[in-house]
Amino acid sequence: MARNAALRQFLAAASSLRLTVALLVLSMFLIFAATLDQVHIGVWGVQGKYFHSFFIWTKAPIGNFNLPIFPGGYLLGAVLIVNLVAAHFSRFKLSASKAGIWIIHLGLILLLVGEGISGMMQRDAQMRIDVGATATYAESTRHVELAVIDATARDHDDVVSIPDSLLSGLGTVQDPRLPFTVRVLSYFPNATIRVRGLGPMEGPNPATTGAGTGLALMPLPPTRKDDEADAPACYVELRGADGPLGAWLVSTRLVEAQELSFQGRRWLLSLRPARDYLPFSITLLKFTHDVYPGTEIPKNFASRVRLRGGAGRDDREVRIFMNNPLRYGGRAFYQAGCDNNDRTTILQVVSNPGWQLPYLCCAMIALGLAVQFGRHLFRFLRGPRANPGAPAP
Amino acid sequence: MNTLLRRFLPWAPLAAAACWVAATVAPEGSAGPYDLAGLGRVPVLADGRVKPLDTVARTGLLLLQGRQRLEAGSGEIPPMGWLLDVFYRPEIADTYSCFRIDNADLLTVFGLAPADGTGGVRFSYDQMRSGLPELDRQARLAGEADAAERSVFQRAVIALENRISLYDRLKYGLEPPGEGRLLTLIATQPERARIAFGAMDTQSPIRVIPPGPGEPSEQWRTAGRGFLEATAAGAPDPALMAYARIGAAWRELSPAKFNAAVDGLAAGLALRAPGPVARAGWEAVFNRAAPFYTSLVLYVAAFILGAVSWLRWREQLGRTALHLMALAFVLATVGIAARMWLEGRPPVTNLYSSALFIGWGAAGLCLILERIHRNAIASVAGSLIGFATLVIAHNLSLSGDTMEMMRAVLDSNFWLATHVVAVTTGYAATFLAGFLATIYILRGALTRSLDSASAESLGRMVYGVACFALFFSFIGTVLGGIWADQSWGRFWGWDPKENGALLIVIWNAVILHARWGGLVRTRGLMGMAVFGNVVTAWSWFGVNMLGVGLHSYGFTDAAFRGLIAFVATQAVVIAVSAIPAARWRSPLSGTR
């Protein structure tokens, strides 16, 4: 009995409209603060800090630790789902008059779940393809990888790629495909490099071999601008069974991969944008960039590409242009921009397993709202005398 | 007789207003000996679209000096007269005080003081001439700074530099400036003429020669290009010859020759490009009629009459207020429809047209509400929003042509017609709920005029409009998400404009849930609805001021001050709503 009462009490609290209103108001504070903070930390920073998180953390006034000061997007969304579900179990009856509300709230739950899925699983990358060239992979704009490439064979490369999540953790990577371990000595999320000996305060050089021996590294704060990308860099030490082979500086600013030989094999080291290899290829046939006559205002960007994949079963031409993406192989390809005097197209490549959910939710909520408010409107239009003083649906 | 009078008298104000409206559309009588209106109807291609020279003249003056009226020593100069002087008598145009400079620091660049300008703020090109190299230098310095980090002075420098550049380029529209007689130049110094025509081709912001047969419809040519092709092929294009005759007549001060040349130009173009000629002609009519200005005046009248009707002559004034608001609404409808036809676009394409549409939508909703409730409340709220949004639209129109071309990603009539219209309708409804609530709070707390019937009908209106607002802001926001998914690959990116729209949705949901949960009653509902104004103003203007996000399209410092002032007034209204009901001047029972 007592357990039952406690459960009922919990249900009453969890399902209350007070909680709904409180959660909605809290989410407004969250969104407003995030909008303002976007000027400082950029749109991606805001997403991570405010929305795709359970708490907003800030540095404690004393000591070296962080304190949660506000609920984040995941927490508010999760509690809102609990609130909605509890309300439907405890307060609402499944009846025709409440059908609109049921549909709205079910759609809302799905929408929140969908945003959660997007936040955790959506991957963004870009492809830059020159006219006439063929690309088989997309590159991340926000993540890098350290590619350790066995380039001994003439016809193919064997690649071991170490994601930046491992690099920034300063760990040691062992991989059965590598005859040496890779130890990350230091990692810089954004840094520029210059020739050594030209500036003050360079300190001793951690790099003992490769291109880094002549270069100095200057850490930079991560960029806040959405149209700029960070250039990470790190010092890595390779160590074979008999001892260290040396320490290298790797950076996305170094265009060429650095070469080394070990046990008769040729290896390449390169810090590069993380790659998503596609099981198909895209060739840029033609790129068009129209402007309105007498202005610089872009009227249209369009890429005519040849798509080859599906183990040879797909070989067709596709036109990708503004508001008209190509969806293929679990990814969507969008016309994002151009470069190189219109000789290079830039395609945004997005994979998001939940991309269809919002469409479904929106249809549901719109239908529910129309049903619910349609009933109101009908009563409302019948005039002031009809049904006085009963606003609750 | 008496009954007849009684039947028709209520309609008399409406009839009088309608006559006034008709007068604004009617062609002007003799505005002067020159057929400036006829030349103003002639189409050219500028800023990527075909428009009449009249629009080029009006938006040019608006851009340079913030208004279309231009005063010179001899009196008022019509926009087309100014444009003709820029084209054909630049040495005279340079003496007109047609550059507005508000920034005192900017004046020191030219060694000027406010006292040197017309009205303290308007200066001529000649006055600025000696300081132009220094302005160029300052503009280069300012250009090196990030747009978001420029100081007030640097922004003013760049704005003025752009305006002077537009003015300079307009001088290349029809003749090479500073080269004297065209035909003499071509005959005696062909090489020099070629260089001058090349400069005209690259500089001119307008293209005056319509496309030839079989050419794409946007392939208009500049006068410079036309002359270059003529020197290769023989006789210049007939349109260029006509423009040359117009210029000669304008310089000779010969109205007869001028009017004959304008007729010749118009007749020639009507054969070669009938579609653009007709469209441009209508746009010139639209410019002259200025339906939104007329509509603004009517809204003011309706607002005053409606508000007075709460104190005296409730029946008569209330009805007239409704009539005038309806007429203003019809005018705004015609204006918006005309813009849609001229642009070939859905109603909302930029910030300017969103202001028009918000006012139109709110007034339309108010007509429906007023039909149901008949207490002049909706008339007052609707005309107030109609008036305010038209004032905002007017200020936004100062940044140039309001029918600008859509950037590639926005170039989608389907999404403009669905997402943008729905979101803007949501804005309109949220504002309407807020203004209705303002009427409730101010009338109830500060006057004795709010009787319980009016209070109850206001309660219903605000509640109903909030439901409407939630519906449209939600639909609009998710349609925006779907558009973003179609064009950028993400449904939701937490972009400031998206966040702003979401805040409106959530706030409307908060209002309704608080009401359903009994957390607030009528008075609380009203206070919350007023806060909806703040949320909507933030979404509409505030987020554009952050300067980040894919949706940003420009802002001005004046807009920022306006937003702060608006939020302050709303805070005052909300504070008034918090005064306990017992201390309100109107005795209202059952409010919490």
Image: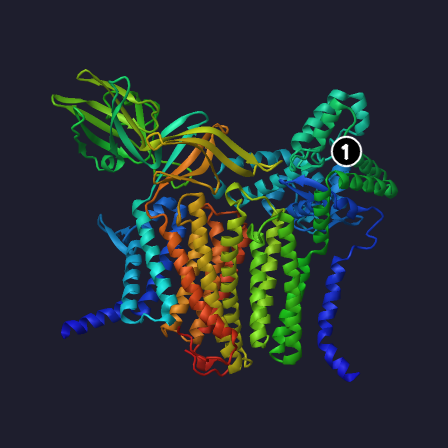
Residue A111, horizontal then vertical, whole percent: 35, 55
Horizontal side, residue A96 vs residue B37: left or right: left
Can the viewer see residue B429 in this picture?
yes
x and y percentages locating residue A248 in the rendered image: 25, 24
Res B355 quadrant in image: bottom right
Q: Residue at x 58, y 67 (%)?
A: B382
Q: Residue furthest left?
A: A242
Residue ID at (44%, 38%): A336
Q: Nearer the viewer, residue A361 or B384?
A: A361
Q: Residues within 10 Å of mark 1 (few under 14, many from 20)?
A: many
The location of residue A24, given as percent across then percent down, is: 36, 62
Residue at 69 percent across and 30 percent down: it is B200
The count of marks equals 1
Is B246 displayed left or right of B421 in the figure?
right
In this view, A297 is above or below B367 = above
Instruction: Specify the quadrant that holds the C terminus of chain B.
Output: bottom left
Letter of the chain that mark 1 sits on in the rendering? B
Q: Looking at the image, what colour scheme do you see?
A: rainbow
Q: Nearer the viewer, residue B396 or B316?
A: B316
Q: Which of the 4 quarters of the picture holds residue B358?
A: bottom right
Foreground residue among B488 and A228:
B488
Q: In this orientation, does residue B128 appear?
A: no
Q: Amino acid at mark 1?
A: Leu
* Residue B69: % across, % down: 72, 51
B376 relative position to A286: left or right:
right
Classify A213 as above or below A51.
above
Judge whether A40 appears above or below B371 on screen: above
Secondary element at image label 1: helix
Query: Which quarter of the image is occupied by the N terminus of chain B?
Result: bottom right
Q: Which residue is mark 1?
A: B240
